[in-house]
Image: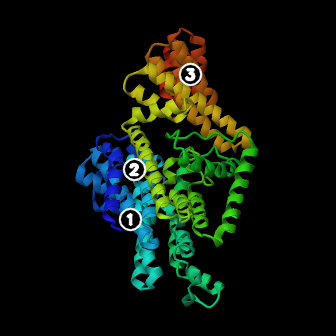
Amino acid sequence: MKVWPFVLGLIVLTLLPYLQVANFDFVLLDDPQYVVDSELVRRGLDPLALWGALTEFHADNWHPLTWWSLMLDFEVFGLRAGPFHLVNLGLHLANVLLLFHVFRSWTGDVWRSFLLAGVFAVHPLHVESVAWVASRKDVLSGLFVVLSFWAYGGWAKTREPGWWWLVTLFVTLGLLAKPTVVVLPCLLLLLDLWPFHRLGDLRLGATVVRRCWRLVLEKLPWFGLVALTSAITMSAQRMGRLSRDAGDWPLALRLANAPIQVWNYLAKMVWPSPLYVPYMYDPPSSRLWVAGAVGLILAVSVGLFAYRRRSLAPLVGWLWFLGMLVPVSGLVQVGKQPMADRYMYLPMIGVLIGVLWCLPNRPRRTARALAGVGCLVLGLLATKCWSQVGVWRNTDTLFGHALEMDPTNDSAHYILGSRALAQGDPEVGLRHLRQAVHWDRTRWERRRLFAGDPNPKNTRHAKTRWADVYYSLGQAELGQGKLAEATSSFRSALELDPDRLDVRLSLAGTLLGQREEDAARNELAEILRRDPEHAAARRITERLGGSVPQVRP
C-alpha cells in the first residue's frame, strides 16, 4: 500500500484548522512571562542568557531547551507573535508525521496508524498545546518523546549500541524541554510488552524474571536522568510555592481530584466540549464520586489485565494513559487548575492505542466501512478543532470564551478586569474584579469545607491575594469619584490584611474626602502606632492639627 497519500492527508488535515494561528496575538496567560516581558528571551541567543536558562530557575520551573527555542524565535523573528505560533504548529506537524511513521513501522498497519496520527493531529484537546505560545514545552518535548520511540524501536529490533545512545540523547532532550516526561522510561517498558513482545525474547534470559530484570537494567541510566530532573524540578517548584500563593490545596482534596479528572479527560476526549482555559478547582460534590472514580479505574485495569491474552495493546494503552497523567495529576499542585487540556497531549496516544488495536481484523469490505467511519470522525474533529483554535486569537476572545463556558471563572474575571482597568475602562474592570474576588473566595471556602481548614500560612496567602484585589477595586473606584464604594473596598482589604499600611492610608484619604475627619484620624493613628516614622501619615496628621509620636534620632 502506498504511503504518500496518507502522509499528504495528515499534512493537509493538520494545517487546515491551525494555519489561522499565523495572525494570532500573544495572550495574557503566561505569554508575558515566557516571551513578551521575559528579559531572558528578549536577550536572544546571548551566551550568558543561554547559560542562565540552563543554570537558573525561570517561571517556577526548569526547562532550558524550551527557553532556548523561544530565544531562537526572538533572535530570528523579533517580538512578532505570528512566527512563534507557526513554530508551535511546525513542531506539532512533525509529531503527527513521526507518530504515523513510528506506529506503521512497528505494526505494519497503515490505516490504524493513520487514524491514530489523524486524531492526534486535530483533536480539540490539543489546541491548547499548539495555539498557545507559552505551551511550547508540550510540542517540543513531544517531538523528542516520539523520536525516542523511533530510536527505541531500532534498539529493540537490532540491539545495536548506536540506537541505545540515540534513545539516551532523545530522552535527555525531552527532559530538558519539559520535566513531566519523567515517565518516558516507563513507557519504553510498556513498549517492551507491546508491540515488541520482548518478554518472550530468549536472548534476554532463560526465565521471565531474568528477562524482566534485563529490560529494567538497560533503562537504569534513563531512570537516573529522570531522578536528576525530578530533583531539580521539585526544587524549582518548591521555590515558586514559597514566593507566591500555590497553596489552598489540602492533600485530601488533591487525592480526591486525581481519580475524578481521569474520567473527565476521557469524557472530553470522547465529547470535546466544553473546552476552555483555565478550568476552576471545585471540590467534588460528594465523596461517593471519588470512590466511584477509583472503583472504575480499578475495574477497567482488572478487565484489561484479564483481556491481555487476546491482546496486550488495550492494557498497554490504558497504563500509558494513566502513567502519563501522574506528573500532572495535581498530587503535587502547581497553579490553580485541577486539570488542563494541554495535559492530554501525550497521554491521548495511550487511549488511541487501546481503542484502535483493540478492534479485530475484519474482511476487506468491513475494513473499508470502518475506515470510512474513521475519516468521518476525523472530519468532525477537524471542524471542532478549527472553532477551538479561533478561541485563542487574542486575550479577549480567549477569556470571553471562558466566561461563556463558565461565568464563575474567577481567573478569567481577574485577567479581563485588570486588562480593562489598564485600558482605561473602569466600569468593565470593576465589574470583572468584583466577580473575580467573589468566586475566588467562594471556591476557597468550598475547598476548605471539603478537605478541612488549610494551615495558617495558606490562609494568609489567600487573604493577601483577596486584599490586593479589594485594594485595586478601591483605587479604581476612587479614580471614578465613588468615595463610598472606595471606602467599602478599602475596609474589606483591611479586614483581610490589617497590616497593609498603604491600604489604610488610602482609606484615611478617602474618609477625609467624605469629611469624616475623626474616622480618618483613627486610621492615621493606627498607621503611626504600627510605624511611627511613616512620613505620609505624619504629614497628614500634622496638617489636621493632631499630635504625632516623637521619632527617636
Is residue 130 something one can see in this rendering? Answer: yes
**Distance between mark 2 and mark 1 Cα atoms:** 16 Å
Q: Secondary structure at mark 1?
A: helix
User: Residue 42: horizontal and vertical position, in percent?
Assistant: 30, 50
* Residue of label 2: 130
Circle 3: is it few (<14), some (14-19), or many (20+) Cα within 10 Å? many
- Determine the image quadrant of residue 422: top left
User: Residue 496: horizontal and vertical position, in percent?
Assistant: 63, 30
Q: Earlier in the sequence, mark 2 or mark 3?
A: 2
- Determine the image quadrant of residue 385: top left
Quadrant where the N terminus sits is bottom left
Looking at the image, residue 177 lies above or below residue 273: below
Q: Which mark is residue 98?
A: 1
Q: Which mark is residue 489?
A: 3
In this rendered view, identify the residue nearer to me: 48 or 23. Answer: 23
Mark 1 or 3, which is nearer the eye? 1
Q: Secondary structure at mark 3?
A: helix
Q: Earlier in the sequence, mark 2 or mark 1?
A: 1
